[in-house]
Amino acid sequence: MSSPLFSSFPAHRPRRLRQSAALRRLVAETRLSPQQLVLPLFARPGRKVRRPVGSMPGVFQLSPDEILKEAARAFQAGVPAVLLFGIPDRKDAKASGAMARNGIVQQTVRLLKKELPELLVITDVCLCEYMSHGHCGIVHQGRHGARVLNDPSLKLLAQTAVSHAEAGADIVAPSDMMDGRVRAIRDALDKGGLADTPILSYAAKYASAFYGPFRDAAESAPQFGDRRSYQMNPANAEEALREVALDIQEGADMVMVKPALAYLDILFRVKKEFGLPTAAYAVSGEYSMIKAAAAKGWLDERAVTLESLLAMRRAGADVIITYSAVEAAKWLREA
Ligand code: PBG
């Protein structure tokens, strides 16, 4: 910018390159493509089940046959990957449903990989949807109240990841935020003959109020307390870099920052510092805010959605997980 060459030129007129859509496209620094998007899907047992999620218009809890239809639609629109969450029939205090060979996620993965082998299937590895208390780890009720136990939870998370990979998951994505879970999962995968299964770690995952609508969708709200003893404090940025560094040391192949829009500074720093393939998760609350404002006619849904996704790319996201993936892919094709 301050080079002598630059300053000796006649006054630069940035508007010259903004005169037409073609010129603007030619010099765009950031591009957004359907190939960078991942669609989250919520699987629940049954057949022909399509239960709308009240706080997320356009999002449904789906039985595996319906997931297949939705995934096929996404794939056809150019979205290469889905992220699966499971809502089991029964929950308990050791998250048995999470690692069951024939659990809801495992069944759905098998179906998707059989019918749509080219679609990438990423599975969310967590215990909260399967725990009666809704926490992401084992809970111990002690004299000083309830605590989420770290190390005992690792074994369950590792078993869950292995069961997903055995079912055919292309990538496993731990979102629990227990310390050491990436190493535990990597070790278990390697021992299980699954050394080629990559880990996308939710490395910098904040204790965010933007997850509100998701907890309706996944029926995973904690029955007591909150997640602040394991998810990150929104006040911290340096700590995010340490979290990411740890996960990379433990064997993460890709890392994630979550939520996205309110955490673009974190995304920028993580991508700049580590350069690993980095994902941003545009979470449920981000989606619902746009939907609600658009329904009132207060915001242009298409324009705001595409601008938000582009901003995540500009900040450093290689991959964006978004409930708008299919719509965004269609809009991008029309553009
Ligand atoms: C599970 C999990 C959550 C989300 C992704 N994985 C919920 C939470 O941590 O409470 C949130 C996703 C969203 O809000 O869209 N631990």
Image (cartoon, grey):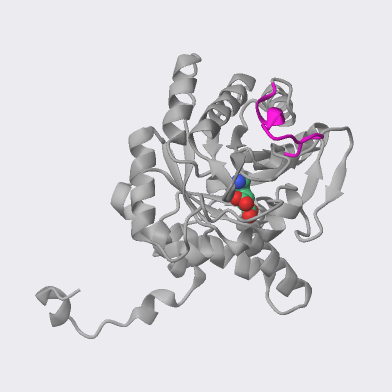
x and y percentages locating residue 158 in the rendered image = 53, 27
Taking 117 as reference, is 36 left or right?
left
Q: How many marks?
A: 0
x 53%, y 27%: residue: 155
User: In which quadrant is the N terminus drawn?
Assistant: bottom left
Q: Is residue 38 visible?
A: no
Q: Quadrant of residue 254?
A: top left
Question: x, y (%) of residue 95?
Answer: 68, 33
Q: Which residues are magenta?
A: 86-100
Q: Decide which of 174, 94 is in the foreground and name it.
A: 94
Up/down of 90 relative to 227, above or below: above
Secondary structure that dominates the magenta span: loop
Task: Name the residue at the front extreme.
Answer: 143
Left or right of residue 245, residue 168 in this image: right
Residue lying at 77% horizontally and 61% vertically, measured from the top left: 55
The residue at the far left in this view is 4
